Image (cartoon, rainbow, N blue to C red):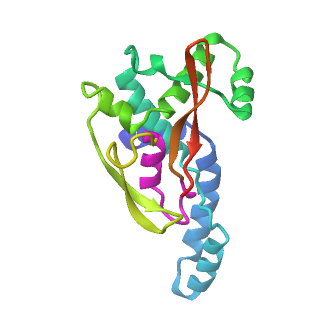
Amino acid sequence: DDADRNHTENVMKYSDEPKSIFNGTASTISKLMTLRNLPYLFEELGKHRSGFFKGEVYKNWIIDQILEKVRGTEVLDRINVELTADQLREYDALKDEEAKQEYVTRKKVALLTFQDFKDYPDLFLQFKCFGTNIATQRGEEYSVEKTPNATILSALRITMSLPVVFQPAFLEERRLVREVNGKRYYQAVRVDD
């Protein structure tokens, strides 16, 4: 129906990556899902140990949800983004200033931490989420108490990592990269256990 079609269009607007990967993958899996083809199915899935999807659609959806709450507030004012070389190329490829500003704003949202959520209780609920730490192969709690400097985005992405379907995700923290004239610049840095 129309509601399902609109939902699908909204999900797919973020990236063409899932369309191309999923269309081929889904048809292959549906063809293989018979008992006599089960060994072949596992062989095919084993070739994709890293997962079929990066999880970019989910990450962009999370950013959209947070942006709804923080746009027009001072939450992002204290975060300055130090763009990586790849991000600078993406930024420079944008044509108008509004698109460039939105790009930087989305990068700032990606740097929000559990501590930021605690610092703005009127905007954010305090929450905990749980996921599996790939390095230790154990469940972990991500919260202001346990991981205050972890980015919300990376913690939430970890919670939805399904083996074979999604590529593994790693916890990231916001780290100070440099300070210039009293302005602090940050990047998300992967936390290695």
Image quarter in which the N terminus is found? top left
Q: Is residue 163 above or below residue 172?
A: below
Q: Identify the residue at horizontal 71%, vertical 26% (top origin).
A: 88
In the image, is residue 163 part of the stretch drawn in magenta? yes
Side of 5 relative to 50 (left or right):
left
> Left or right of 12: which side holds 5?
left
Residue 167 in which image quadrant: bottom right
Asked if residue 174 lies in the magenta stretch, the reply is: no
Asked which quadrant contains residue 42, the reply is bottom right
Q: Position of residue 87 (x, y in %)?
A: 68, 31
Image mark count = 0
The range drawn in magenta is: 151-169
Among the 4 quarters of the image, the one containing residue 70: top left
> Residue 118, relative to residue 140: is it above or below?
above
Residue placed at 34% from the left, 46% from the top?
143
Quadrant housing the C terminus: bottom right
Q: Which percent across, then down, holds residue 50?
A: 62, 62
The x, y position of residue 175, in whole percent, is 55, 35
**Residue under the image location 39 percent in, 13 percent down:** 72
Query: Residue at coordinates 54% horizontally, 50% vertically from top-left?
Result: 191
Query: Where is 51 relative to 188, above or below?
Result: below
**Residue situated in front as seen by the camera: 146 or 30:** 146
Q: Residue 62 at what x, y percent from top left? A: 43, 38
The vertical placement of 53 against 107, above or below, is below
